[in-house]
């Protein structure tokens, strides 16, 4: 097997040799294959499965009914009938209901005071009180929707009875004045589900994180084992470094183009995620996304000194990337430095652009800021990746360099 | 082995580990810099924590005193910042598509004439639900501000006829709800997420550092020297090796708690000790899970990628975002295999009311169980080190 790189080869042959070598590295490493299979296929399926329930349905609620009247029972039935909640128990008193909440058996308490029906009966405003736990905002949201819906329904049912409390002469005029209709419409994500909102973003972050891990493992291993020196055979001119970076990126992009079809093409269809984007736009987005991510990873390889250490620096930040993308919390409300960080990691604009395309049906014009950002990142990180590789190769030739394992084994 | 011998063995491994840690900048980076970065990130990412001044648009097709009045009312809502006025719905819709605004209100043509003439008039608002968390805030704020407006014409008519405002409101809304979000009355995102998410990021780091610290002995073939320093006792070897990390991580955890509760003034109901003892127990349990997972198959290059995935799952399975009891059965039960889930349960109990140990003892016990399970596999780890079988797996 010929391992030394031939300096007299043409540039394309040189790239081809680098590509072939990179393929072999990936295909012969259990660890890398595990990240690819585990990260892409297992994770892609698992995340979808975990969030597949999508909505809070029939969350247990305790009803403390001090009124014990027909009206209060009607109200409790409405709470029970709401899709978001179901009545877990009609607790005899507030302390008992609170106990259930402490145990986590109910997510909230509806308290109906003892004069609930009386007040309606004498034409006063009647009040019920809803306490919701906030340890998950979705719980509180579910409870609020259920109690507000039950309230509107109860009001509509009993309004005709309240007419008796208005002066007889004016009833006609008042009841015939129409109220202004208020109509709220959710744009996109018509299921209003949590999974269908979060998963598209997660899929893009999975692509970013696993690709970064693979690059980290490969480039870290090159430095840890010293095999990075083989690149020095072709010289360290910028053209040669560009060929190294291009050859490696070619492999990553080819591989991930395939995975992207699985994650972004198949998963939304199988799991009923929002999928209103056009394949053309997604493909156009993925080109700069994968290229920028590869260059970013190669540029970051200055920090990767062996094949495992990079994972320590990459894996923890998946959640942070979803925040930085602006999908889960509005960018406008973050401090300026995190808004700036949005433009540093390719995952942030990439994820946002994908959500825009596939969940919102955006066109290329609508994702212009993200798209331009990604291409600028491509340019910047390409230069940085070349410099990083030059730095790494030179360091590998320094006598004191990159031999942690020797140092520690000497001990 | 006598007691003094065991102590000297413990000290020897400890000193050896300290030299290993200080020999590479990597350790300083991942044990100190990254966790501190996480504290900073989670403490600052939500800004003020309130969903305030969310950009929205108004499409006023009416251009009358009434429509301007409604626009002013909407602009005065603290949740909203009306950043743009659009001439038609098409451009407002386009702006939502580009995520310039998160929702918009449409006041139709002839709105004022219809309202004054007693005809049906409609106010439509649209909110962004592909970005669900913002969208639900926008919807809530629109509902709060527009519902009272909707009753406006009837109230005006009734008051003109001499009926008291109170009487007509009681007629319109005989039953009212009072909603009380417990413990977090402002529905503040920092209060809700900063603390649990810091620990979710932190546990990934703890797991990986633990696996790396133990696994690098096998990878760099120093396992024999490590065991020799511990005089062949694997428990001493592992305990002394991980002790420096335990101390560092606990200190960082306490620092994180201090930043969130001391500096950011996130409310909490328990005292110093319950909070930080829970943090300490969580650090140790997470390390134990790391040792356990590594001992199953002690080849670092394979197991570290698995552990990084296990760690990332913690974000979902902690149940902070989507409540775990509403996930499918297998996922719900699997979530108990993650220390972070128990930790979040205990911590939420401590922060949201401090109900007492009676409500959290199962979770505390589970965290201790992680330790016991890790101990069970230590003999296997020792055999693996001595056999040298896992050194060449890549």
Image (spheres, grey):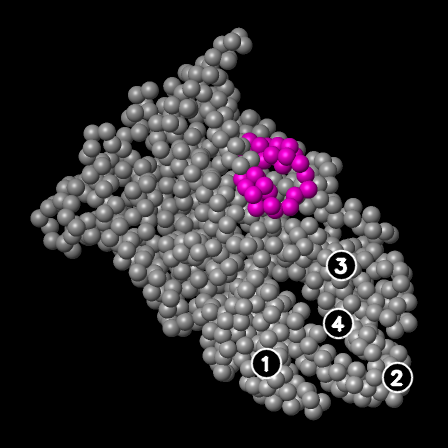
Picture layout, residue B175 above or below residue B250 = below
Looking at the image, residue A307 sits to the left or right of residue B172; the answer is left
In the picture, the disc for residue A130 is 3
In which quadrant is the C terminus of chain A drawn? top left
Q: Is residue A302 visible?
A: yes
SS state under label 2: loop
Residue at which label 2 appears:
A167
Residue drawn at x 46%, y 69% is: B100
Numbered disc 1: what chain?
Answer: B
Residue drawn at x 58%, y 29% is: B371
Q: CA distance from mark 1 to mark 3?
A: 35 Å
Residue A254 in the image, given as x and y percentages of width and height: 31, 57
Camera-nearest label, 4 or 1 = 1
Residue drawn at x 29%, y 53% is: A381
Residue at which label 1 appears:
B68
Q: Do marks 3 and 4 share a subunit?
A: yes
Picture layout, residue B120 above or below residue B12 = below
Numbered disc 2: what chain?
Answer: A
Name the one closer to the observer, B197 or A175.
A175
Q: Do marks 2 and 4 share a subunit?
A: yes
């Amino acid at each position: 097997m010929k391992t030394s790189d031939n300096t007299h080869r043409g540039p394309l042959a040189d790239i081809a040799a680098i590509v072939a070598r990179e393929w072999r590295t990936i295909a012969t490493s259990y660890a890398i294959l595990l990240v690819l299979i585990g990260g892409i296929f297992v994770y892609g399926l698992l995340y979808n499965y975990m969030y597949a329930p999508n909505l809070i349905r029939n969350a247990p609620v305790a009803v403390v009914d001090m009124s014990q009247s027909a009206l209060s029972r009607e109200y409790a039935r409405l709470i029970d009938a709401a899709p978001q909640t179901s009545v877990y128990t009609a607790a005899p008193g507030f302390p008992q209901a609170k106990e259930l909440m402490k145990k986590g058996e109910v997510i909230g308490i509806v308290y109906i005071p003892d004069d609930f029906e009386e007040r309606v009966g004498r034409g006063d405003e009647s009040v019920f009180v809803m306490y919701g736990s906030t340890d998950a905002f979705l719980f509180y949201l579910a409870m609020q929707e259920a109690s507000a819906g039950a309230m509107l329904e109860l009001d509509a049912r009993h309004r005709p009875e309240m007419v008796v409390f208005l002066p007889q002469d004016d009833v006609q005029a008042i009841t015939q004045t129409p109220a202004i209709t208020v109509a709220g419409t959710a744009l996109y994500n018509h299921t209003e589900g949590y999974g269908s909102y979060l998963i598209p973003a997660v899929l893009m972050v999975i692509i970013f994180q696993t690709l970064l891990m693979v690059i980290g493992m490969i480039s870290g291993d090159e430095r840890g084992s010293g095999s990075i020196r083989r690149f020095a055979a072709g010289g360290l001119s910028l053209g040669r470094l560009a060929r190294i970076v291009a050859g490696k990126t070619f492999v990553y992009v080819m591989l991930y183009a395939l995975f992207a079809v699985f994650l972004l093409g198949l998963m939304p269809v199988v799991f009923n995620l929002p999928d209103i984007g056009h394949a053309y736009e997604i493909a156009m987005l993925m080109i700069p996304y994968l290229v920028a991510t590869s260059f970013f990873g190669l540029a970051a390889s200055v920090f990767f000194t062996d094949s495992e250490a990079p994972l320590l620096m990459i894996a923890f930040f998946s959640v942070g990337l979803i925040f930085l993308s602006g999908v889960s919390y509005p960018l406008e409300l973050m401090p300026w430095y995190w808004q700036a960080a949005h433009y540093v990691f390719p995952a942030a604009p990439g994820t946002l652009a994908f959500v825009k395309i596939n969940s919102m049906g955006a066109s290329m014009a609508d994702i212009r800021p993200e798209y331009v950002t990604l291409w600028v990142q491509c340019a910047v990180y390409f230069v940085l990746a070349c410099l990083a590789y030059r730095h790494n190769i030179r360091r590998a030739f320094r006598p004191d360099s990159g031999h942690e394992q020797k140092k520690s084994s000497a001990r | 082995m006598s007691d003094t011998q065991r102590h000297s063995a413990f000290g020897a491994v400890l000193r050896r580990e300290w030299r290993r840690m200080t020999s590479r900048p990597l350790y300083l980076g991942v044990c100190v810099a990254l966790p501190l970065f996480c504290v900073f990130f989670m403490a600052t990412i939500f800004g003020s924590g309130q969903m305030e001044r969310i950009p929205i648009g108004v499409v006023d097709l009416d251009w009358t005193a009434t429509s301007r009045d409604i626009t002013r009312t909407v602009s005065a809502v603290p949740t909203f910042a009306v950043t743009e006025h659009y001439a038609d719905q098409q451009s407002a819709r386009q702006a939502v598509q580009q995520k310039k605004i998160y929702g918009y209100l449409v006041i139709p043509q002839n709105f004022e004439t219809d309202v004054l003439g007693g005809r049906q008039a409609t106010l439509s608002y649209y909110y962004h639900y592909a970005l669900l968390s913002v969208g639900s805030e926008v919807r809530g704020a629109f509902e709060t501000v527009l519902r009272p407006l909707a009753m406006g014409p009837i109230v005006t008519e009734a008051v003109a006829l001499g009926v008291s405002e109170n009487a007509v409101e009681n007629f319109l809304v005989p039953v009212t709800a009072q909603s009380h979000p417990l413990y977090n009355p402002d529905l503040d995102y920092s209060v809700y997420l900063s603390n649990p998410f810091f620990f979710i990021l932190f546990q990934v780091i703890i797991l990986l550092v633990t696996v790396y610290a133990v696994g690098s002995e096998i990878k760099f073939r120093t396992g024999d020297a490590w065991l020799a320093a511990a005089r062949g006792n694997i428990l001493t070897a592992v305990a002394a090796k991980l002790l420096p990390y335990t101390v560092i991580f606990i200190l960082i955890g306490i620092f994180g708690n201090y930043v969130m509760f001391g500096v950011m003034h996130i409310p909490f109901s328990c005292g110093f000790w319950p909070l930080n003892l829970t943090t300490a127990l969580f650090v140790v349990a997470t390390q134990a899970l790391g040792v356990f997972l590594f001992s199953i198959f002690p080849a670092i290059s394979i197991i570290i990628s698995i552990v990084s995935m296990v760690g990332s799952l913690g974000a979902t399975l902690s149940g902070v975002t989507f409540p775990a009891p509403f996930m499918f059965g297998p996922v719900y039960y699997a979530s108990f295999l993650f220390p972070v889930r128990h930790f979040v349960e205990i911590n939420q109990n401590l922060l949201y009311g401090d109900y007492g140990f009676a409500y959290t003892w199962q979770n505390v016990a589970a965290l201790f169980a992680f330790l016991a399970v890790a101990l069970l596999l230590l003999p296997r780890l020792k055999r693996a080190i001595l056999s040298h079988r896992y050194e060449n797996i890549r």
